[in-house]
Image (tube, grey):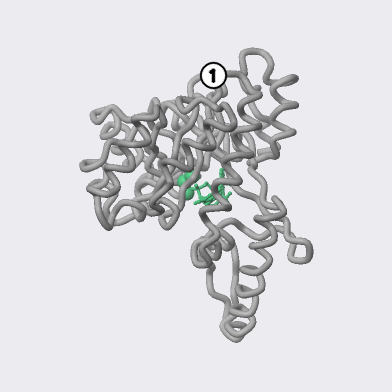
């Protein structure tokens, strides 16, 4: 029978458990080559001001087009990279590429980069990130690191040291997928985050979900009390956007504005459609 995948988008069959583990082994060995050959590339999804649609930056999202399998979803290859010790090299190669692209874009645009739990625990993480910033000339103040609560939950004190080290460099820290974990609130109380990202499960279709409305409005007042910036993920329709405007949520991202796209397309859009102070034209509602 069909089982929903980890994030609901990848269906596995029970009788294929064997093939699944062979697939994993194969993907793991292909992944090593992909990292070495730079076949995994950063895509960029716009993050905008919800009240004005002004562009403020991008979330960097990894994309891998496998020669025979086609697109392998990041939740599959990131986990394999974590298990096989490749997440460090993969992450730093991606960050380097992202910084090289973004360094050529206007100063006021920042990038937000995901660090997975295993990668967050690496001893030299902060030094490695600092090295990439130095080598690429990308300003630390233009970088946000996104982590989830599973990165910090084991030991808040160790996590705090790392977060403080990033912040001392001028890098900002966001708590990703807020609301989906078990201890999101304990994380907020214990650690000095700059921003939280409301998980898209609370955002998509918000105008029709009374529970989501209450939860998001609660998160927003919590965030305002703690002086945290908020980004709503997964804005898919004009109705989602209108509802969030009513709640005065400050930042958002989602397919309604733009899917994650390659760097070349961002560069082109910055020179054409977004050249006017980087204000995104309102997307066509029919196309969304
Ligand atoms: P995330 O960090 O929560 O990233 C947001 C995910 O939501 C992305 O999926 C993005 O494409 C998707 N998304 C954005 N707007 C919408 C929308 O309007 N509707 C829907 N349905 N989805 C939307 P993606 O790119 O598949 O990435 C999935 C997860 O994989 C990420 O979740 C992140 O945890 C991880 N990931 C992706 N790239 C990297 C990376 O470079 N490093 C690490 N460590 N993890 C990564
Ligand atoms: Mg993220
Ligand atoms: Mg997220
Ligand atoms: Mg999410």
Residue 233 position (above or below residue 81): above
Q: Position of residue 259 (x, y in %)?
A: 64, 40
Q: Quadrant of residue 20?
A: bottom right
Q: Position of residue 171 (x, y in %)?
A: 41, 31
Residue 56 position (above or below residue 257): above
Label 1: element kind: loop
- For image coordinates 60% across by 73% down, the residue present is 24
Q: Quadrant of residue 173?
A: top left
How packed is label 1: few (under 14 Cα within 10 Å), some, or many (20 or more)? Answer: few
Q: Is residue 254 left or right of residue 19?
A: left
Pick the quarter of the image with the C terminus.
top right
Residue 161 position (above or below residue 274): below
Residue at the far right: name it: 68
Residue bearing the label numbered 1: 108
Q: Can the viewer see residue 200 in this picture?
A: no
Residue nearest the viewer, comparing 199 with 114 = 114
- For image coordinates 66% across by 13% down, the residue present is 276
Pick the quarter of the image with the N terminus.
bottom right
Q: Position of residue 275 (x, y in %)?
A: 69, 16
Residue at the far top: name it: 276
């Amino acid at each position: 029978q069909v089982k929903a995948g980890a994030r609901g988008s990848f269906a596995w069959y029970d009788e294929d458990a064997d093939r699944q583990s062979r697939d994993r082994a194969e993907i793991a060995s292909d992944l090593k080559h992909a990292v070495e050959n730079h076949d995994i590339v950063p895509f960029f999804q716009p993050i905008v001001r919800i009240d004005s649609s002004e562009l403020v930056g991008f979330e960097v999202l990894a994309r891998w087009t496998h020669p025979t399998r086609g697109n392998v979803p990041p939740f599959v290859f990131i986990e394999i990279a974590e298990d096989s010790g490749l997440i460090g090299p993969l992450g730093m190669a991606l960050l380097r590429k992202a910084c090289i692209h973004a360094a050529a874009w206007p100063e006021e645009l920042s990038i937000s980069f995901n660090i997975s739990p295993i990668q967050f625990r690496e001893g030299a993480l902060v030094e490695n990130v600092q090295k990439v910033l130095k080598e690429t000339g990308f300003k630390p103040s233009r970088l946000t690191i996104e982590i989830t609560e599973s990165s910090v939950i084991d030991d808040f004190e160790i996590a705090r040291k790392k977060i403080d080290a990033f912040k001392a460099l001028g890098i900002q820290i966001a708590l990703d997928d807020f609301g989906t974990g078990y201890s999101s609130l304990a994380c907020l109380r214990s650690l000095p985050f700059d921003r939280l990202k409301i998980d898209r499960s609370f955002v998509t279709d918000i105008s029709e979900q009374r529970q989501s409305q209450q939860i998001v409005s609660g998160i927003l007042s919590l965030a305002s009390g703690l002086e945290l910036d908020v980004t709503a993920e997964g804005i898919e329709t004009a109705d989602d956007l209108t509802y969030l405007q009513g709640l005065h949520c400050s930042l958002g991202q989602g397919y309604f504005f733009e899917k994650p796209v390659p760097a070349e397309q961002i560069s082109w859009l910055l020179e054409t459609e977004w050249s006017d102070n980087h204000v995104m034209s309102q997307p066509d509602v029919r196309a969304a």
